[in-house]
Amino acid sequence: MLEVREIRILIVEDDPTIAKYLQLNLAKLGYQVCGLATTGKEAIERGLESQANLVLMNLHLQGEIGAVEAANHIYQELGLPVVFLTAFSDQETIEEATKAKPFGYIIKPFDQQNLSANIQIALTRYDAEKEIKRNMHCKEELRQQAEELGEMRSRYLAIASHEFRTPLSSILFASTLLEGCSQTWSEKKKQDYLQLISRSAKDMTQLIDDMLTVEKTGKSQFSFKPALLDLVSFCQKLVEQMQPLAPTLSPIDFKYEGDFLGFYLDVKLLRHIFTNLLSNAIKYSPQGTPVLFTLTREDNQAIFIVRDRGIGIPSTDLEKLFSVFHRGKNVKGIKGTGLGLSIVKNCVELHGGHIEVESVQDQGTTFTVVLPLIDHSQITNNPQSVEQNTPKQLF
């Protein structure tokens, strides 16, 4: 509850004598009168600009907007409690007043004690209602968070069980055949089934790594540890490593423009970001269409663009694209867990950058990642941010 001297009151009264009387008594009680109004319309306007804590309003105002309508608007839209003033206490007048759910009802003539008591009661009730609404809002937020957590756990279990079941089935199938039939197989056939087991194990390992990465980045267990890096060389080597994953005649076309020597970036975060973006671009691109990967510089920012001409992302999925486990409705049978882009966003933000996406269904998707380039002077001013074990330039 505010102290009396801090409480600002707006008077709405079309009788100048009563308005003056109210003003004098409120001043004696220590309240601030922050405005005077004579009509409902003026009360709404003054309520908006006066920064009042409470409104004292004559119940029988003249004009196109009556007191009840004005009081309702002031409470519902401006969030200000209203106390009515009236010379009448008959049932009809009381019923009319209750339509606005006022915080008080003062019968004229009134004295200072009656006026002060009604104001204090109204403000106490108003504070109590605000606290109840705040608690209800907090409970609703907690309920929604619990529901979202429950849904996420359900999706987590469903996706994890599905994604693990497939490689496990392959491993079991291949190992059973190898155990029972390999004596009559050619060496090539044996190698094919061993490779199936190896690929399945790698798929499971990748899924586990992705889940652990999401967990760590979500709980801020990753830290930003920049090291001196040749960014162009890093991108070129990453493309070389990922190129074998691309479909036939769908190369990763890397181009750069600008000077990127002498800057500090976090290699671990960069790997997470661009391994995921490039692998997604490859996965969702048709054969024969290159994936474009560009690097340019704008002042002290590195701008990366990964563009494909693949299946695109439906507009309804863009809002939740970076949420854990979310996948576009049009991915059909293409394998994926919905973890990669969540990892990307967390790593971009840990790097102090931001990511944007543009996509047209059936035409392709473009991801733009903007990361700050940290030079030696910034590192000197904040030496704790540098990876202690990487004094030499990487790549």
Image (cartoon, rainbow, N blue to C red):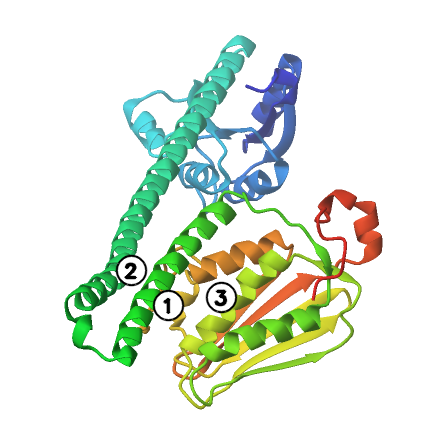
Residue 96: name its quadrant: top left
- Helix, strand or loop at label 2? It is helix
Q: Locate residue 203 relative to residue 301 in the image: left or right.
A: left
Q: Which residue is mark 3?
A: 276
Instruction: Give residue 177's position: percent from left, percent from top.
Output: 17, 68
Relative to 234, does residue 42 appear above or below in the rendering?
above
Within 10 angstroms of label 2, few (less than 14), some, or many (20 or more) residues? Answer: some
Within 10 angstroms of label 3, few (less than 14), some, or many (20 or more) residues? Answer: some
Dot label at residue 49:
none
In 3D space, how far apart are the residues under numbered discs 1 and 2 (Cα atoms)? 25 Å
In 3D space, how far apart are the residues under numbered discs 3 and 2 (Cα atoms)? 18 Å
Q: Which residue does the image show at 20% across and 77% down from the upper left?
A: 185
Q: Which residue does the image show at 79% across and 51% down from the upper left?
A: 379
**Residue reaching furthest to the front:** 183
Instruction: Give residue 208's position: percent from left, percent from top.
Output: 39, 53
Visible in this render: residue 85?
no
Residue 287: name its quadrant: bottom left
Q: Which residue is mark 1?
A: 316
- Helix, strand or loop at label 1? It is helix
Residue 252 or 94: which is nearer the viewer?
252
Q: Between disc 3 and disc 2, whose residue precedes? A: 2
Q: Which residue is mark 2?
A: 163
Residue 355 or 195: which is nearer the viewer?
195
Amino acid residing under circle 1: Thr
Q: Which residue does the image show at 35% across and 66% down from the upper left?
A: 198
Q: Between disc 1 and disc 2, whose residue precedes? A: 2
Q: Locate residue 23 relative to residue 204 in the image: left or right.
A: right
Residue 394: name its quadrant: bottom right
